[in-house]
Image: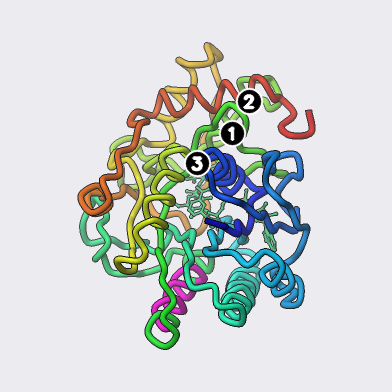
Amino acid sequence: MKVLVTGGAGYIGSVATEILLREGYDVLVFDNLQQGHKEAVSEGASFIEGDLSQYEQIEAAIAGFKPDAVMHFAANSLVGESMQEPFLYLNDNVVNALNLLKAMEAHGVGKIILSSTANLFADPLKMPIEEDERIIPGSPYGESKGIIERFLHWLSITKGLKFACLRYFNAAGATELHGEDHDPELHLIPIILQVALGQREKVFMFGDDYDTPDGTCIRDYIHIEDLISAHILALESLDAGNRTYNLGNGKGFSVKEVIEAARKITGHPIPADIAPRRAGDPATLVAGSDKIKSELGWNPKFTDIESIIETAWKWHSAHPDGYGG
Ligand SMILES: NC(=O)c1ccc[n+]([C@@H]2O[C@H](COP(=O)([O-])OP(=O)(O)OC[C@H]3O[C@@H](n4cnc5c(N)ncnc54)[C@H](O)[C@@H]3O)[C@@H](O)[C@H]2O)c1
Ligand SMILES: O=c1ccn([C@@H]2O[C@H](COP(=O)(O)OP(=O)(O)O[C@H]3O[C@H](CO)[C@@H](O)[C@H](O)[C@H]3O)[C@@H](O)[C@H]2O)c(=O)[nH]1
């Protein structure tokens, strides 16, 4: 099967490409390298440097490769940035997805897996958060993903598109070959590990006055290999119907707990200070993922925060300058 991976030079997309190739899929990566790295694209995948905002570029890529399915990772994806720069999200994420969907439609590509987000759930009625939770996006970023989910719904009804919306909670960890390398780095775990590597003095914890046991935000960290195994299960099940799943470990860890776990693994004291809250951050996000477990037999391998951080620490220690090193 041929799979087009948009954003395949980025953090999660590079791991998707690695695992798809290992499982025998033929992969084309389409990425504009605004955040991604050419070096992160596995050997064995084809690569096109292109921008989804340019319809002709994605249309030509699809016309040439003729994929059976698309995994759509390419997006602006920062909750905090979206509160400062809403049009990058409400315009760009949405228009770029539409360009992709139009090009797929033009060439009869009928299957897509969307990277959606836990940021759809800013005010959940129940924890852990299940698929039937009410959708109240926490930021323009979350809103943009919710809008794209609705596009898929309508294209399925009108054009027979088959889709899976996978709402990831916090992707974390690394494989031996691929890890997280953003510039600037704004995600919690790589920032903590940069402190352990002596590249930063300290980590700032955004808010300690949330309604959580230790006052810092609680998130559900899911290892990227487990995330991608869910993508492949979803892809292979699309003929039997569309899918919407929340993907996490079902366990929440506070910012303080994540830092403490990293101290144990790295042996570094990792100094941490309190800073103001970051706009757009809900207090607690923990996934209920029983639906994908029971429907598709998904079985995540990394269930505790230490083992996830350990894989990231291994990658960051081996690549202290990321893909540039
Ligand atoms: N990291 C997480 O915890 C997380 C959680 C939930 C959802 N997601 C979603 O997963 C996806 C991947 O996230 P990530 O953490 O790997 O991000 P990332 O920034 O590492 O990867 C995104 C990739 O898309 C590329 N890209 C962006 N805009 C593009 C465009 N217009 N045309 C072509 N390529 C473009 C970037 O260069 C980058 O390589 C995103 O859609 C994100 O919203 C991520
Ligand atoms: O220097 C930092 C960075 C982050 N945090 C906190 O750590 C938690 C995790 O933050 P981060 O690693 O930036 O991830 P999120 O903002 O939770 O967002 C990720 O997880 C979302 C789903 O929950 C996805 O949709 C996003 O794309 C992805 O970036 C949050 O409570 C942040 O406030 C800090 O306290 N200090």
Q: Dot 1 corresponds to which residue?
A: 190
Residue drawn at x 58%, y 40% as measured from the top left: 18
Judge whether 258 appears above or below 237 on screen: above
Mark closer to the observer (2, 1): 2
Q: Mark 2 and ligand 2: say if the CB distance to the nearest ligand atom is below 8 Å.
A: no
Mark closer to the observer (1, 3): 3
Q: Dot 3 corresponds to which residue?
A: 23
Are circles 1 and 3 on residues that touch, CB within 8 Å?
no
Residue sticking out furthest to the bottom = 158
Q: Please indicate whether residue 277 sits to the left or right of residue 95 in the image.
A: left
For the residues marked 1 and 3, what is the alpha-carbon distance in whole angstroms? 28 Å
Please state the horizontal and vertical placement of residue 244, each as a whole percent of the image.
33, 63
Q: Which residues, given as a range, are shown in magenta?
A: 144-154
Which quadrant would residue 179 be assigned to in this image?
Answer: top right
Q: Dot 2 corresponds to which residue?
A: 316
Are circles 2 and 1 on residues that touch, CB within 8 Å?
yes
Q: What residue type is labelled 2?
A: His
The stretch drawn in magenta includes residue 121:
no
Residue sticking out furthest to the top = 267
Residue drawn at x 68%, y 42% as measured from the top left: 44
